[in-house]
Image: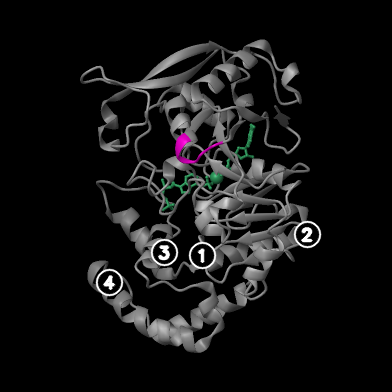
Amino acid sequence: MKNTVVVGAQWGDEGKAKITDLLAQKADMVIRYQGGCNAGHTVVYNGETYKLHLVPSGILYGNKICFIGAGTVVLPEVFEQETKELKERGVDLSNLKLSPLATITMPYHTEIDGWAEDTVKKGKIGSTRKGIGQTYTDKMARCALKIGDLFDDETLSEKIDIILPLKNKILKEVYGLKEYSKEEIFELLKKYKKIFEPYICETWQELLKENKNKTILFEGAQGVMLDIDYGTYPFVTSSNAIAGGAGTGSGYGPTMIKDVIGVSKAYITRVGEGPFVTELKDKTGDKIREIGHEYGTTTGRPRRCGWFDAVIARYAGLVSGLTSVALTKIDVFDDFDEIKICTAYKDKRNGKIYENYPTNVFMHKYLEPIYETHAGWKTKLSNIRTYEDLPENCKKYLKRIEELIETKISIISVGPDREQTIFV
Ligand code: GDP
Ligand code: IMO
Ligand code: MG
């Protein structure tokens, strides 16, 4: 296997973790390069389900180096809980490494996130309340704490003196929230140091050098449509969820990346607010949600469901430079008489057709999907392991998707388990 990025090609929850876990068999190192514990990544292995938020999806093998890169933001309490649970379940974490350059999510980040979610009415994001946007805001504003800072008291003291007065002013005067004393922050950070100590990799440059000629898998979080620059802004997350994020967030440059696999579901889902042209607010949407168990891994919220959108898939192909697609959850349609695919959008006001993604999302309320309808296969797919054995209607449907998205499908997923996969 060549060095590969696994990236979400929709609004997240496409099944990236299943694909990453699967491909990790052939990798030496798996790197999470962006996002934080807003991600909910489910791996099913040996009939057991693991829900990961920050830990890379190669961890279950035990012998793969799993690196959490500089582009990520880390909420210490979630990291602590996640690593504790994995250890209790017998997962070997000796190869889990954390970049000292990853940014720490502080309690005031989650508090402001919660405040915004509870207070803002118009233009609410529907975030995961994990302080993601606020942590990245501070990182970009150059007033964030990095995990490496925890390991030098002098640096820490100096940085707190710079950050805290400004932070307190904002907390008090803008949000009416509780201020923090230096002692309080210091105590908290001592606790965080303990949490990160077993995993911090100060020698990350050597680690990356040693693995440079080995096989690297880059695990994306969220998806292209949640990317800060290319997604449905402002209804996005605050990091580069496109494949390009793997270059900045991992410590390896873009020349290391040879393949980019975009993960798409055979339909599409979204959690949180924002435009969604093919959304189904009817019984079909409910049916997809129930069969596909479309409830958020991180927040438990019901996911909004809709038909596959080839406009989005083509857009993802472009902005993430996809070399192929992994199409997941096609088994959810086993019982459907008809399956629709959106091929383009039409503006209700003037009949204008959009085959490329219109990036001004505030006019999406005027768009309607143009669908084509395909006959279902009415066959259980979950036990099929070869492309040849797929029912004819299913093959036709897959061929048509390939045509519409202008990218080949390299992996078809017919169930949550590692085994339930067809390599094309
Ligand atoms: P991620 O965030 O992209 O890693 O995806 P999530 O883990 O949040 O959501 C995907 C869900 O679909 C998980 O519960 C997976 O176990 C499940 N899943 C993945 N692939 C398939 C598939 O092909 N069929 C079915 N039925 N479930 C799948
Ligand atoms: P994985 O990696 C689906 C969504 C939130 C919200 C928006 C901003 O499991 O695919 P944030 O908390 O990031 O500030 O919220 O992004 N969101 C996700 N939706 N899957 C995810 O991750 C998501 N991470 C964030 O619901 O709409
Ligand atoms: Mg998820």
Q: Element under label 2?
A: loop
Question: How far apart, in angstroms, are the residues tagged by discs 1 and 4?
Answer: 21 Å
Question: How far apart, in angstroms, are the residues tagged by discs 3 and 4?
Answer: 14 Å
Q: Residue at x 61, y 63 (%)?
A: 81
Residue reaching furthest to the bottom = 154
Q: Earlier in the sequence, mark 3 or mark 4?
A: 3
Mark 3 crowdedness (10 Å alpha carbons): few <14, some 14-19, many ≥20 = many
The residue pinned by badge 1 equals: 75
Residue 176, percent from left and from top: 26, 69
Give 119 or 327, whichever is nearer the viewer.
327
Question: How far apart, in angstroms, are the residues tagged by discs 2 and 1?
Answer: 23 Å
Give 251 or 242, whichever is nearer the viewer.
251
Residue 36 in sight from this viewpoint: no
Q: Earlier in the sequence, mark 3 or mark 1?
A: 1
Give 133 or 253, whichever is nearer the viewer.
253
Residue reaching furthest to the front = 255
The residue pinned by badge 2 equals: 90
Q: Is residue 296 magenta?
A: no
Amino acid type at circle 2 is Gly
276 displayed left or right of 9: left
Q: Earlier in the sequence, mark 2 or mark 4?
A: 2
The residue pinned by badge 3 equals: 135
Amino acid type at circle 4 is Ile
The residue pinned by badge 4 equals: 170
Q: Are marks 1 and 4 in contact (CB under 8 Å)?
A: no
Q: Which stretch is magenta? A: 318-322
